[in-house]
Amino acid sequence: MSSSSTDHTLAVEVVDSMERMSGRHPGQRRSSARGAAFRATFAPTGAAAALTTAAHLQTRPVPATVRFSNSEGNPHTPDTAPVTRGMATRFHLHDGSDTDLIALTVPRFVAATPREFLELTEALRPDPVTHQPDPARVHAFVGAHPHLAEAVAQQPPVPVSYASAAYWAIHAFVWVDAAGTRQAVRYRWEPEAGRLGLTADEAATRTAHYLTDELHQRLEQGPVEFVLRVQLADPDDPTHDPSTVWPDHRREIIAGRLEITAPADDQDHWDKQAFNPTRVTTGIQLSDDPVLAFRAHAYAESHLRRSHHR
Ligand code: HEM
């Protein structure tokens, strides 16, 4: 079998397992089901221009669309749940093409390989009696994969706002400059509003839809901004493992500023769209991270199912 058909077979298995974990919700994304889309402009600082030829990282601002979401595959999970949140950004380039940057409110992914992710979703499958995951199975998963203990234990605070969390794109990507020189990078969005979480008592006073409602209200007062910070790897830093991070003291540059201005006009359109972390552009390449390459197959399978209202 070619590696692509192997990936496809595994993607079908993974998406089946995600459905067993979160329930089957026809027409919905199999992860990050509840979300809303917003209009934005991304203005590059020019600081990245010496390292990549990517069009949106030079000097000219580009329009963008941002979809914020809760990471759950169940669209009925309330916003007050202690889950990770997602920020999927599509940059609309001036040549008519697009490039995506997809991020979560944690720096590490919970698996180093697609197969580990499959095993974790199986361990998280709710018990038929309690309807909750069995902590003993999760414990056994971590026991069998001790290198994932830190990643599985991450629990970001329930945010005050979608605008008050940092979002990591987690995987390494490779920037390529005009001379063909390569530089491995990792991206992070930092909120201009600062990182602000709710206490459990505060979260208990919020509604099931507060995150989208709050962002709509906030935007009536003015734009919401994020800074795109990019960490530059040393030549020996590994690029294949999304469950690990590079040292904090690696050099960072500010590649640009994102200004979110209003809800997107056509939410239905964005409900049907599929973001894709492998949708890169000239000047950006995928790293050797097997999870990054695999995601394209899993997202396509999820999109196929929901496009047929399955
Ligand atoms: C084995 C690894 C992963 C698998 C199998 C997986 C699976 C999925 C699936 C099936 C979807 C729904 C796709 C659709 O129907 O359009 C999704 C959405 C999403 N995933 Fe992942 N994911 C993985 C890793 C990650 C990582 C590492 C990140 C963050 C860097 C991430 C962030 C997101 C976000 C933010 C969305 C929502 C995108 C949107 O708003 O449309 N995922 N994921």
Image (spheres, rainbow, N blue to C red):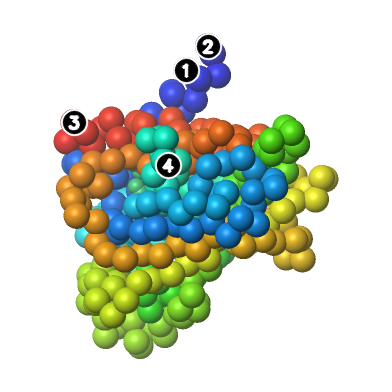
- Mark 1: which secondary structure? helix
**Chain-order first, disc 1 or disc 4:** 1
Residue 117 in view, yes or no:
no
Callout 4: 10 Å neighbours few (<14), some, many (20+)?
some
Question: How far apart are labels 3 and 4 at the CA level?
Answer: 29 Å
Real-space Cα distance between discs 2 and 3? 27 Å
The tag on residue 5 is: 1
Kind of residue indicated by mark 3: His
Within-10-Å neighbours for mark 3: few <14, some 14–19, many 20+: few
Q: Residue at x 45, y 78 (%)?
A: 193
Q: Residue furthest front?
A: 60
Queried on whether the Cβ of the residue with tag 1 lies below 8 angstroms from ligand 1, the answer reads no
For ligand 1, tell me if the residue under mark 2 lies within 8 Å.
no
Gap between marks 1 and 2 measured at Cα: 6 Å
Asked whether the beta carbons under mark 2 and mark 3 sit within 8 Å of each other, the answer is no
Question: For the residues carrying marks 3 and 4, which lies nearer the camera in this image?
Answer: 4
Q: Position of residue 309 (x, y in %)?
A: 17, 36
Q: Earlier in the sequence, mark 2 or mark 4?
A: 2
Alpha carbon distance from label 3 to label 1: 22 Å
Residue 63 picture location, percent across and down: 37, 52
Q: Earlier in the sequence, mark 3 or mark 1?
A: 1
Name which residue lies at 72% across and 53% down.
232
Whether residue 308 is situated above or below residue 250 in the rendered picture: above
Q: Which mark is residue 93?
A: 4
In the image, what residue type sits under mark 1? Ser
